[in-house]
Image: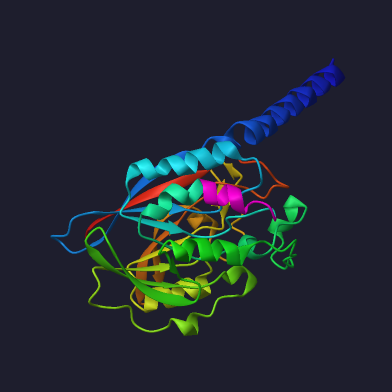
Amino acid sequence: MRTRTVFRLAGAIGLAGAACVAYGTFVERVRYTLRRVDVPVLAADAEPLRVLQVTDLHMTPGQRGKQDWVASLAALDPDLVLLTGDNMAHPESLPGVLRAIEPLLDFPGAFVFGSNDYRGPVPKNPFMYFNPNRVYKQGADLPAEELRAALTSAGWADLNNAKATLKAGGKQIAFAGVDDPHIHLDDYDAVAGPADPEADVRIAVTHSPEPRVLDRMAADGYDLMMAGHTHGGQVCLPGVGALVTNCDLPRSMAKGLHWYAAGEHAAWLHVSAGLGTNPYTPFRFACPPEATILTLVPR
């Protein structure tokens, strides 16, 4: 009787596990979600500014559902669009990325790249994400320069190790950004220095939210820092949250809006869980794919 009970319990656990895998692969992974968050960074009498953040598309050929959903975000009529990297996951994914974001190019925008804009992903053991000493492995070349040309020709600001000033929603916005710190392409020295005090709002952008970069952004006086990369942990557990962030950011900050303190300096940090996955680990659990409308409001 005891042996039969053990077998029944093992069978039940196996079925539950299989159900979770099926749900995460076929349901939650494509349950695209729009999140909304208010960020108090504007002057007391300022009108709100609506910023759409899209990140971590990890597009592969044929993902029409994802493309259609992203394209539909243009109906939100944002004041500004920020694309925060890892748009591609296959050498032939550029047409799908452009089909998804083309309606968004009508709005003022800016972008940084992630590692999966330059080189494609490779198969890996998911448990390697728990190894702090893992070595990043690069895959096939991706058409990064073609994507860059499409974005800049639409008037979007390239913030890869660069500063820019844009007018959006009737406001002057001072930007600084870095190329992807995850693969050590960041050069913060190229943009270092106090953020423009005359701007209506100051926004700093990076793909991977590495504290060594965030600390300097906060110290330079940026009001809001924005990033992707973490996938929100991609797999989260009730009562535990994200298991990993794939960077040095604490797991408690894997997604969402946080007050980020760096010594005597602090700023708001928004980390998006993004819209895709590595094509070799097409699974999400308790962490649906997302884009975010951040409404900047008075302090």
From this viewpoint, which residue is outermost toward the top? Answer: 1
Q: How many marks?
A: 0
Q: Name, please, the residue furthest toward the left.
A: 45
Work out whether residue 97 can be spotted.
yes
Residue located at (18% from left, 55% from top): 47
Q: Residue at x 72, y 66 (%)?
A: 136
Left or right: 141 as drawn, with respect to 159: right
Q: Which residues are magenta?
A: 91-99
Which quadrant of the figure has residue 185?
Answer: bottom right
x, y percentage for residue 292? 41, 48
Q: Residue 98 lies in magenta, yes or no?
A: yes
Give the camera-side residue of 58 and 11.
58
x, y percentage for residue 131? 72, 61
Q: Is residue 10 left or right of residue 260?
A: right
Q: Secondary structure of the magenta portion, mostly?
A: helix
Is 245 rendered above or below residue 277? below
Residue toward you, 66 or 37:
66
Q: Residue at x 83, y 22 (%)?
A: 7
Q: Is residue 208 visible?
A: no
Give x and y (percent) for residue 58: 61, 51
51 relative to 150 in the view: left or right: left
Q: Outermost residue, front direction?
A: 153
Which residue is at the front of the view, 136 or 178? 178
Viewport quadrant of the C terminus: bottom left
How is the model colour-coded?
rainbow
Q: Is residue 141 magenta?
A: no
Quadrant that contains the N terminus = top right
Q: Position of residue 263 (x, y in %)?
A: 40, 76
